[in-house]
Image (cartoon, grey):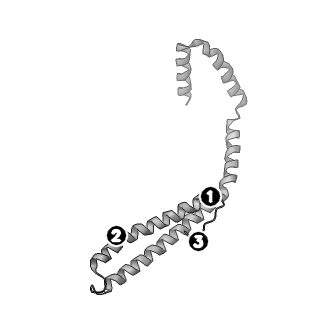
């Protein structure tokens, strides 16, 4: 970092030397204040305090969505096994394949629709009718 600052200072001095008279007071002010770390830590504390509840809320929402998608996949797998065990005169094999090819993406889409719908709610709650 110091090499970069020194290189910029050298380039500025070579190309536009009058700006050195502006850089010297700026460097002096930077050394005099040395307050950047304190301000940064104070801002991090404020951001953490503001986002703490939002973080936990999003985490619980992700966990709920994961459980819902897992339950949907479990129900889908059980129904698929049931369809395979039925004789082909009741359910044709091509319909089972069609159900498989559309069922899993539908489960994922419902999960993402539910998750994104929750995040768009201004008050942090989700309607049961999604």
Q: State which quadrant residue 95 falls in.
A: bottom left
Dot 3 crowding, Cα within 10 Å, few <14, some 14–19, many 20+: few
Q: Which residue is mark 3?
A: 128
Q: Position of residue 106 (x, y in %)?
A: 42, 68
Per the model, the C-alpha gap separating discs 3 and 1 is 23 Å
Position of 57 compared to 104: left or right?
right
Q: Secondary structure at mark 2?
A: helix
Quick one: quadrant of the N terminus? top right
Q: Are marks 2 and 1 in contact (CB under 8 Å)?
A: no
Which residue occupies 58% across, 62% down? Answer: 118
Eyeballing the image, is 79 above or below 28?
Answer: below
Dot 1 crowding, Cα within 10 Å, few <14, some 14–19, many 20+: few
Q: Nearer the viewer, residue 27 or 83?
A: 83
Q: Secondary structure at mark 1?
A: helix
Q: Which mark is residue 2?
A: none
Question: Which comes before the other along the chain, label 2 or label 1?
Answer: 1
Q: Which residue is mark 2?
A: 101
Quick one: quadrant of the C terminus? bottom right
Q: State which quadrant residue 31 falls in.
A: top right
Question: Which comes before the other along the chain, label 3 or label 1?
Answer: 1
Q: Which residue is mark 1?
A: 55
Which residue occupies 35% across, 81% down? Answer: 81
Q: Nearer the viewer, residue 57 or 1?
A: 57
């Amino acid at each position: 970092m110091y090499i970069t600052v020194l290189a910029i200072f050298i380039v500025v001095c070579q190309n536009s030397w009058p700006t050195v008279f502006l850089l010297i007071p700026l460097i002096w002010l930077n050394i005099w204040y040395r307050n950047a770390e304190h301000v940064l830590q104070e801002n991090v504390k404020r951001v953490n305090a503001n986002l703490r509840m939002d973080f936990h809320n999003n985490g619980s929402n992700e966990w709920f969505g994961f459980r819902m998608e897992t339950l949907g996949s479990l129900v889908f797998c059980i129904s698929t096994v049931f369809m395979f065990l039925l004789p082909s005169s009741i359910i044709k094999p091509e319909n089972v394949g069609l159900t498989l090819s559309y069922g899993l993406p539908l489960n994922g889409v419902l999960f993402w629709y539910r998750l994104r719908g929750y995040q768009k709610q201004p008050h942090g709650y989700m309607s049961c009718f999604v």
